[in-house]
Amino acid sequence: MSVSPYLQAPTTAPVQPKVALFITCLVDSMRPSVGFATIKLLEAAGCQVEVPDLQTCCGQPAYNSGAQQDTQKLALQNIKKFANYDYVVAPSGSCIGMLHQYPDLFKQGTDQHQAAENLACRAWEITSFLTDVMQFQPAPSQQSLSITYHDSCAGLRELGIQQQPRKLLAKVDGLQIKEMEEADTCCGFGGTFCIKFADISNRMVSNKTANAEQTGVQMLVGGDLGCLMNMAGKLKRQGSAMQTRHLVEILANMLDTPAIAEAANTALRPANTDLGYEV
């Protein structure tokens, strides 16, 4: 898997770009607070944000299952809905990575292929968009919190997202980041992978949560809700007090909602390690 060839940031930050928020299925149905936090960050960066109606699934489950025609239908729907925006941004490397696969769905030289390439060039994950496109410097904020960060497979390997979220998190005063072992190793979710290969998936998430727990921090943070729900569920079943959140909730200072897999907004556990930010 290689980084998308469509990631070409402008040399200067655009002024008040018109941005479509691609809300994604999981955020829409499971964690709307991530969507609101993303809008807050985009507006703080000077963007004009809209949430187009009738946007649909990126098509990744169908694509990974070999349903080419169904994926094409979903792709064409999104291409149409996002046509009139300067950029399309989502709080998910996985879903944006799928948008970057759209050109492969159509024959080169066709209008559909050209439209798919046009969308791919405008599609960005939120942290990459804020740092690489908008050159955004978040307003100073204060949070007494210790975290470890999980790199999602799609964000890292398809979109080259690794330092961008860490740079943004490093701007939060009082936030301490402790890197876990194998931070860039798959959590075992993988969309339909966790259903088709449940035993392997369970071993993978067990290894991931064990590495997170060994850091002694209060919170596990990442940029893809599928990964976060998978890891949060495992931590919950193990009786862990470690919280799990999407990083946009931290960056937007929107921590009033319960953590992922929590029914109520519980207090943070004490950190049990001497932490410092590690690049």
Image (cartoon, grey):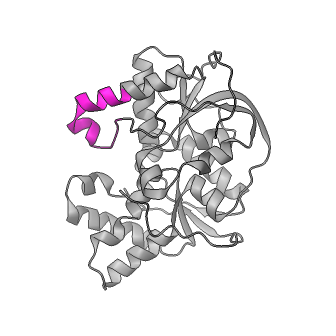
Q: Position of residue 260 (x, y in %)?
A: 50, 30
Left or right of residue 121: residue 86:
right
| Quadrant of the rendered image containing residue 275 | top right
Quick check: 80 above or below 190?
below
Left or right of residue 225: residue 85:
right
Q: Which of 256/62 is in front? A: 62
Determine if the magenta segment contains residue 70: no
Q: Which of 56/260 is in front? A: 260
Quarter of the picture containing the N terminus is bottom left
Q: Which of 104/89 is in front? A: 104
Magenta residues span 188-205
Q: Position of residue 96 (x, y in %)?
A: 45, 58
Q: Main secondary structure of the magenta part?
A: helix
Q: Position of residue 53 (x, y in %)?
A: 47, 62
Quick check: 277 above or below 191?
above
Determine if the magenta segment contains residue 190: yes
